Image: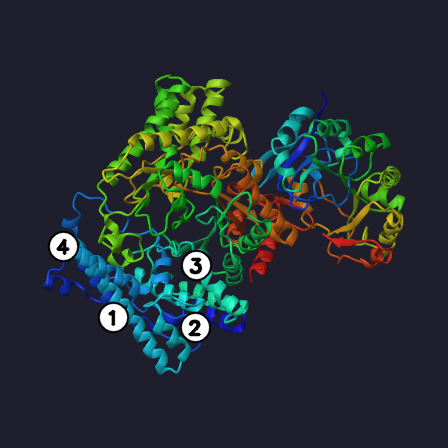
Amino acid sequence: MTSGIVLDIKEFTVHDGPGVRTTVFLKGCPLACMWCHNPESQSIQPQIIRSPSGERLAGQEYEAAELATLLNQQAALLRANEGGITLSGGEPLFQAGFVAEVIDHLEKGTHVLLDTCGHASRADFQLVLARSNLIYYDLKLIDRKAHLHYTGVDNDLILGNLEVLGESGRPFVIRVPMVPGVTDTDENLAGIASLVENMPALVEVDLLPYNRAAGAKYRYAGMEFKPDYDETQPLNFNTKIFEQAGLKVKRV
Amino acid sequence: MNERLVLLKNSMRAGKHKALRQAHSIELLPECEVADLSWPRRVARLVRRQCEAERVIIAPDEQIVFTRSLPGVPPVYTDEEWASLTAGRTLHELGPVSNICADWGLLLSQGLLGRREVALATRQSMPNDPQALEFLDSAIETIDAVMALSARYAEEAARLGRADLAAVLEIVPAHPARTFREALQSLRLCQAVVWLGGNYHVGLGRFDQYMGSFLQSDLQAGTLTLDQAEELLAEFFISLNKDSDLYPGVQQGDNGQSLTLGGLKPDGSSAVNELTRMVLRVSRDLELIDPKINLRIDTNTDLELLCLASELTRKGLGFPQYSNDEVVIPALLAHGYDLEDARDCVVAACWEFIIPGRGMEVVNIGAVSFPAAADQAIRSSLAEGLSFDEILSRTAAGIRQQVDRLAETYSRLLLPPAPYYSVFMHGCLEQGRDLSQGLKYNNLGIHGACSANAADALAAVKQFVFDEKNVSAKELLNALQTNFAVYEPLRRHLDEDGPKVGSNDARADALLVKLFEDFASACEEYGRLPWGGLLRPGTGSAMYYIWLAEGHDGMREPLVGATADGRLSGEPFSANLAPAPGVRVRGPISTLQSFSKIDYRRICNGGPITMELSDTVFRDPESIRKVAMLVRMFVQLGCQQLQLNSLNVETLLDAKAHPEQHKNLIVRVWGWSGYFCELAPEYQDHIIARSLYQVA
């Protein structure tokens, strides 16, 4: 029996996939994006969050079957309402074995959405991919050096797994966090478009607006927020780049 | 909404019509005293003089008229007479019959003249029953007064050259309505006169059922377009909001002017019609507090209808409130209601299920304080070193004691006569009996208030004192008696680590279920009231979530100090069916699952699961559809009633000032959701500002 660390479980997450869903946020992420809006999700260790509403412990250990039992209490209801379970993070593939085991314990027919940054070994990615119905795949930066600078890792694994995803035929959505002057440049968006334009299972590209509320959460988690870009710059939502490549694109 | 309606609404909101109000109430006492009138005669005279004293007010382009000009309802007895009349008896709230529902279909199908004919026929058949004759003559006096008022409106309309309006008023309310407009006009005038006569919380009943056929036939005949019909309906709704500052209630807006949509026809088929949808659309576009809307649904209800209803929820008005027919109807049957009547049920002022035209029920005689019952049992049993089972049985005994006390008080209930209101009830004119002498159903309703806190307190005691044994009885007792003065760590342990209702946690939910089982048993074992009615247990809490914690003048329920769920003395309890304030629960689905465990077949009085969603989850049609699916889940789980709120700016401001009370408040920030209280102040302000923008 595998156990894992869960940051939070949220019900009725209306923006985390089709239908009525419950989202499991796994704790721990191999990336440390400069703009991360859930800094408390980066470390796999449970930690104290101190905010004006009081203190709470972020992070709880579950055994895979225990978590699945909890989720199965509402699986039929979610299924009856066009939804299911979303696995997000943090990075769910950071605990791929645990996540796969949780999915295996879910009631048959439960719709599973994997929301991932793609930075995982090919084996780990395939392990969870094979058990998921829909993938939300984040693409941040095409330039390898920039990726290393802003996220702490290069994008070799991510681009490699993107190929695996494209070939798998599983329906997927590309999600681009729009960071002013960093990920929203025409050059980067064009790079993303050209990578995915020939992947038939791609449902759409979602552009996620930059979130300026991140700073406080760093304080509450006892961490430091230090962007080296100008947060106040307007975002370049150049959707044409994707439309010209024949892709469906959406501002979320 | 077209420009004319916007102007009408703005004019009403600005209160321009209030300038036309009379400075003083009429005086009635001398006349009653001189003639030494009986009580029914006095009430009839009151209605008549009020109608006579009303000013005729017709605004230039109004299609549905009647604007109240009288500021108040004068007494029909002196204070001394009133005191001796009511000595030893229990009056409900202010005294006059309130919070029941007429069958307005009787008005629309028979007209006041038709009802008058019924009264006259009964009069002929009961020449030797003075009480019946007095009632019937009183009722006829009020009917004539309303027709005279309507005639004055018709004359004034003619004088102003408003031939269309004059033509409508020549037909209704005297005759049966023939068109949608006539039906709305008839209802507006006749319902307003019920208020003028001192009755209050005057419900509008199954509006889409008794009114739907008029809409349908006008549309089919081509005499009315859909747009014109919506405009008439909007005008009718605006008119319902004109006088609400003159209505009695705990707070302004607490006026019970509610209507019920949807549900089933007498044969069990769906009753949803064109007017059901039109009411939801018009209410959504108008954004006014009246009428308050209830929607009866079941597992077969179209998701599209629930989407439309969710668009209304989005407006943050707190309605529609949903009732689940698959739960409500069997519960009514189990309490002695006939199937056709149960299928005809409506929601009273707040939550209670009543039958229009057939119930003289007082559905809110008071509350059982679950926290008091649980707390007294916990304190006394711990002090005596008794078992948890003993705590449970003492809790049940405390509940029974409270039920018995309320029932004893209300078995001396005195209802003043209401000859005019009786005109619209089944059987009154037919049998020569005022509604205050009883209708087909005459039950009383009691609410079981603040159940979540009580269940949480019991669950914490079981968990920590008896199962884990990490809190001693003595320590907990000391902590409760001193309001946790030097026991903050223990208070936090109880508050944060105890099992809580609302998270689908069997440990707490089992105790919630037990509280309601004990409550239902107490009501069942009390048996029949002197006049044959039953006690209906319910799940509402109205203002009790504040009163039971802080105390209130004239309150009959016991007060509670600090409680074993970690709640400090004076802090509010949970409202209706909701997790205790400040408790962080797993989410809305788990909360529905928790409350689905109650046996609603025994708990039939009503009282909603109350849930708040951030208005940011209503942002796009896809999300609204998901809200509709959440409503469908409520039905699928077999819950009874649901009040869904879209959070508004005030709540956000309160959350900013008192973050500890709003830990569950989730807001959509941009492309993600977060806990409102964990956002930095400047971003909270941003969301508040954005919400302001959305409302405007």
Which disc, if any, is residue B130? 4
What chain letter is assigned to the residue under label 4? B
Q: Which residue is identified by label 1?
A: B52
**Residue B600 vs residue B506, the one in the foreground:** B600
Q: Amino acid at mark 2?
A: Gln
First of labels 4, 2 by sequence position = 2
Q: Which residue is depicted at the point 19% across and 58% down?
A: B123
Q: Earlier in the sequence, mark 3 or mark 2?
A: 2
* Residue that badge 2 annotates: B63
SS type, badge 4: helix
Q: Are marks 4 and 3 on the same chain?
A: yes
CA–CA distance in space, label 2 to label 1: 22 Å
Occupied quadrant, residue B536: top left
Up-down relation of residue B404 to residue B273 (above or below): above
Q: CB under 8 Å between callouts 1 and 3?
A: no
Q: Chain of mark 2?
A: B
Mark closer to the chain start, 4 or 1: 1
Q: Which residue is mark 3?
A: B290
Q: Under tag 1, what secondary structure?
A: helix
Q: Picture coordinates of residue B13 (x, y %)?
A: 44, 66
Q: Residues within 10 Å of mark 4 (few under 14, many from 20)?
A: few
Count of numbered labels shown in the rendering: 4
Which-is-in-front pick, marks 1 and 3? 1
Is disc 2 on the same chain as disc 4? yes
Q: Can I make out residue B557 in this image?
A: yes
**Residue B314 position by quadrant:** bottom right
- Look at 86% across and 47% down and name the residue there: A196
Asked if labels 1 and 3 share a chain, the reply is yes
Do the dots labelled 2 and 1 sit on one chain?
A: yes
